Image (cartoon, grey):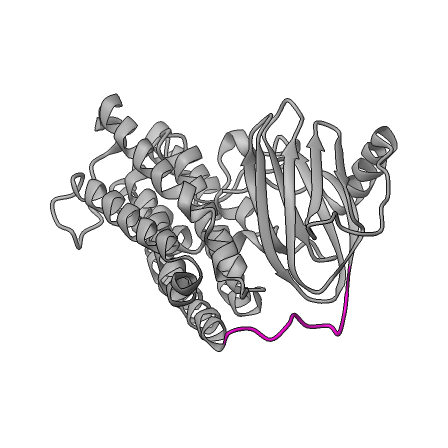
């Protein structure tokens, strides 16, 4: 789930104001190891380079602010090349991406809201990244097919959910709610890469920007489980959800997908689990968090599986650890459903605190080696 962006006019004004406050310095080259040092704080985003050659780009990020931040490499139209969310105060993170020649921005978003503070980045070269292992091209093609299939399969399930809402059938809508989200949760980084779709369909109430109308799954979730009723507004929102999901489905084929974005996206899915599902915040009314949890893990594992052959050659110890931790987490999740092929999971409010801690520990044990996958798939 990603909070909404500011409007274009507000975004420009905010960026100008924040840049004036920060007085960011400009440098022309990356540091000695080729990485761009990114220093984020509550009102600044300093970068050590404004120009790098096309190919592998590494951001070494340090958050010196008081809020968790998100750092992104963006196309001029706000599509996301690569990102890292939830970089806590006082913590560091290394983000590896593949970037073609062109003009980009590096954005720091304190509190993970709004337009953020941005720095220009020029990527020089022939217009394309260097030739890579053909197995990685096959992995990208296979993942693109997977993402499209998930979107295609989501629509009829979402339409069944919307139809129940429009019929005023609370029980049927509740039953259809969680299954309608599985394909989305498996491939959420692709949807998030467009910037504007996720806030329409998957934002929680506490993620809304000032003036943003609350739409999407979680608005309807609240109506069904907390309010226990469906009115004219909810029926209209059901139609809007389908319109927005069709937009997502139609744009999946245009997403910028690279081996490193697949790897970083897998890590982002685990971060989604850690910050929303394990805490019970994502599905706070329906308590269907474990369905989302499992779908996030499946999506991350799909990316890893497609990249594994190359990653294993570069770092066999890493892939062995990833195999181990994926297996452990999946085994643990199986304890909360009667059938391993079913998505009929235990309601999360019925999961004891000690068991939630075990789930959290298993997520963290997987997330740490998964954060190294992007570097492992880059040709040496």
Which residue shows up at 18% across the image and 52% down it? 342
Residue at 64% of width from left, 72% of height from top?
130
The correct choice, above or below, for 14 with respect to 131 in the image is: above
| In the image, farthest residue toward the left | 338
Residue 97: image location, x then y, percent: 60, 56
> In the picture provided, is 355 more to the left or to the right than 213?
left
Q: Could you tell whether 207 is left or right of 156 in the image?
A: right
Residue 322: image location, x then y, percent = 34, 50
| Image coords of residue 65 (percent x, y) | 67, 25
Bounds of the magenta segment: 123-133
Answer whether residue 160 is magenta in the image. no
The answer, for residue 161, to whether it is visible in the render is: no
Residue 34 in the image: above or below residue 140? above
Asked if residue 131 is among those painted magenta in the image, a careful observer would answer: yes
- For this rendering, which residue is in front, 46 or 369? 369
Residue 154's image quarter? Answer: bottom left
Q: In this view, does 28 lie to the left or right of 35?
A: right
């Amino acid at each position: 789930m990603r909070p909404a962006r500011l409007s274009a006019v507000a975004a420009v004004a905010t960026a100008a104001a924040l840049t004036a406050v920060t007085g960011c310095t400009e440098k022309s080259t990356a540091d000695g190891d080729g990485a761009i040092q990114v220093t984020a704080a509550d009102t600044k985003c300093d970068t050590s380079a404004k120009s790098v050659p096309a190919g592998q780009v590494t951001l070494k990020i340090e958050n010196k602010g008081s809020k968790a931040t998100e750092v992104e490499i963006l196309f001029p139209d706000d599509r996301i090349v690569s990102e890292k969310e939830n970089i806590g105060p006082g913590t560091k993170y290394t983000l590896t991406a593949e970037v073609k020649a062109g003009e980009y921005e590096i954005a720091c978003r304190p509190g993970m809201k709004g337009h953020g503070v941005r720095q220009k980045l020029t990527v020089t070269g022939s217009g394309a990244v260097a030739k890579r292992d053909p197995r990685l091209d096959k992995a990208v093609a296979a993942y693109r097919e997977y993402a499209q299939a998930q979107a295609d399969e989501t629509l009829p399930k979402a339409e069944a959910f919307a139809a129940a809402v429009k019929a005023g059938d609370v029980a049927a809508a509740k039953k259809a709610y969680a299954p309608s989200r599985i394909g989305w949760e498996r491939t959420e980084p692709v949807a998030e890469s467009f910037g504007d779709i996720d806030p329409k369909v998957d934002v929680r109430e506490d993620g809304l920007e000032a003036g943003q109308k609350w739409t999407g799954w979680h608005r309807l979730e609240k109506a069904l489980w907390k309010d226990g009723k469906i009115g004219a507004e909810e029926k209209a929102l059901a139609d809007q959800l389908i319109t927005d999901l069709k937009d997502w489905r139609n744009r999946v084929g245009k997403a910028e997908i690279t081996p490193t974005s697949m790897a970083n996206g897998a890590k982002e899915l685990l971060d989604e689990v850690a910050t929303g599902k394990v805490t019970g915040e994502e599905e706070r009314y329906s308590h269907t968090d474990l369905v989302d949890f499992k779908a996030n893990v499946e999506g991350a594992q799909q990316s890893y599986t497609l990249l594994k052959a190359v990653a294993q050659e570069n770092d066999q110890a890493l892939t062995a650890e990833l195999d181990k931790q994926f297996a452990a987490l999946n085994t643990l999740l199986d304890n909360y459903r009667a059938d391993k092929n079913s998505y009929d999971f235990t309601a999360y409010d019925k999961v004891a605190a000690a068991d939630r801690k075990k789930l959290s520990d298993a997520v963290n044990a997987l997330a740490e080696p998964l954060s190294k996958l992007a570097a492992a798939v880059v040709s040496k």
